[in-house]
Image (cartoon, rainbow, N blue to C red):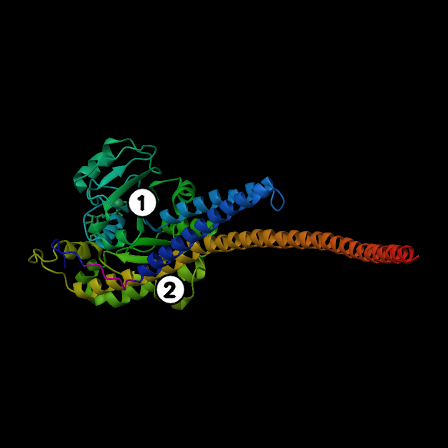
Amino acid sequence: LTERGKRIPLDNSPLQIFVKAKKKINDIFGEIEEYVKDTVDYMHEVEKDGKIVNSDQVKNTEEYVGKVHSIRDVLQRDHMKVAFFGRTSNGKSSVINAMLRDKILPSGIGHTTNCFLQVEGSPSDEPYLVLEGSEEHCAVESVGQLAHALCKEKLNESSLVKVYWPKNRCLLLRDDVVFVDSPGVDVTPNLDEWIDKHCLDADVFVLVANAESTLMVTEKNFFHKVSTKLSKPNIFILNNRWDASASEPEFLDQVRKQHQERAVDFLVKELKVCTPREAEERIFFISAKEVLQARMSEGKPISVPLTEGFQTRYFEFQDFEKKFEECISKSAVRTKFEQHSQRGKYIANELRDILEGIYSDALKLKEEKLAERKELNDKINYTEQQLMVVTQEMKKKIHSMVEDVEQRVSKALSE
Ligand code: GTP
Ligand code: MG
């Protein structure tokens, strides 16, 4: 535990699948960027010669620099996104707070969530929020201040307020999980707008249901709409307020069974997003309020008496968190990085083709030059031979002329 009573980062969390994959793919794209830049520099050198590459080819290759750069930008910002939905007061904000181990989002009476709130990690030590359409960082020290800032502004229910929370205060935020809290699905006619604006890039959805009642048509409708726009969304169902069951232990098993069957039917038969076996790993009975209280008082003496069955509900919440982390991490790697790695492969192949093209053009040019040189050499050799023949003949002629003259001279002398 740290001084503040928080868990020390453990790197065997399932979220590390995403974190490590993100680092790896970012490194690979860093190398691809170097590779593209080297290729462009090399082509500029070769272009000077004017025989192997032309300016169009160089321009085409230069375009890859920008492309790779923008992919790197997107990759650096990639995160895992989880969105929470459910009817008003079911405990959406409380579940997020329990997972973040701190009272970050306003919840409870007078703190109804009235717009979309996104909580994400920030490298700075102080929390702040940014309203939609604004760049201004508004400092927030406490939940009270955050709630006040949200009430003060006249916000549209579909608008988004981003809360930047120091990464060093929370493991999930450090590991690139972004949380989206929403107003109750029963308070808006604009579900389509919500989905288009906030849900299309979500990796996991959490339906926070109320275990004291049953799944409502409004909640079901919302997820029917989501699953028409996204193929097989990952949905978890939390039956929150399960602590209420402690007051009626005689019905506990029966009620749980009934909720469980209905939730499985909803995921498997209605939405058709998972198999019955998978559904068993997606439905949990928890109490966000208790978990939050317990986590906030870690390291301090227990102030409120624990309700019967607290430990079981707490373990079930931890189980939910584990399954959630595995699911979001794997799903985000698949959806976020698969496309980019295809794109990276494509670019690397294109560059290899370009360089191979240059190489084979250069070879052709070399062969042409060699052929030209051979022709020239042959000509020189021929001329040399001719010259030799002529020289030999001349030598012979001169020789016989000299002999002839000598003979004549000696003959004249003897006469
Ligand atoms: P809206 O933002 O208004 O849509 O509500 P919400 O879904 O965010 O619910 P919120 O987290 O604000 O919780 C509503 C009230 O329910 C608060 O007073 C919580 O303390 C309480 N609550 C949340 N979870 C539990 C729980 O597990 N058990 C009990 N008993 N109360 C809970
Ligand atoms: Mg709320």
Disc 1 secondary structure class: loop
Name the amino acid, label 1.
Answer: Gly
Locate the C terminus and report the quarter of the image it occupies. bottom right
Q: Residue at x 52, y 51 (%)?
A: 347
Q: Is residue 207 visible?
A: yes
On the image, numbered disc 1 is attached to which residue? 184
Query: Quick check: is 341 in the magenta stretch?
Result: no
Task: Tell which circle, 2 or 1, labels the residue nearer the N-terminal end.
Answer: 1
Q: Which numbered disc covers residue 279?
A: 2
Q: Which numbered disc covers residue 291?
A: none
* In this rendering, the label closer to the viewer, 2 or 1: 2
Q: Is residue 278 above or below residue 98?
A: below
Predominant secondary structure, magenta span: loop
Q: How many marks?
A: 2
Q: Position of residue 95 (x, y in %)?
A: 25, 53
Q: Is residue 316 above or below residue 412?
A: below
First to last magenta residue range: 8-13
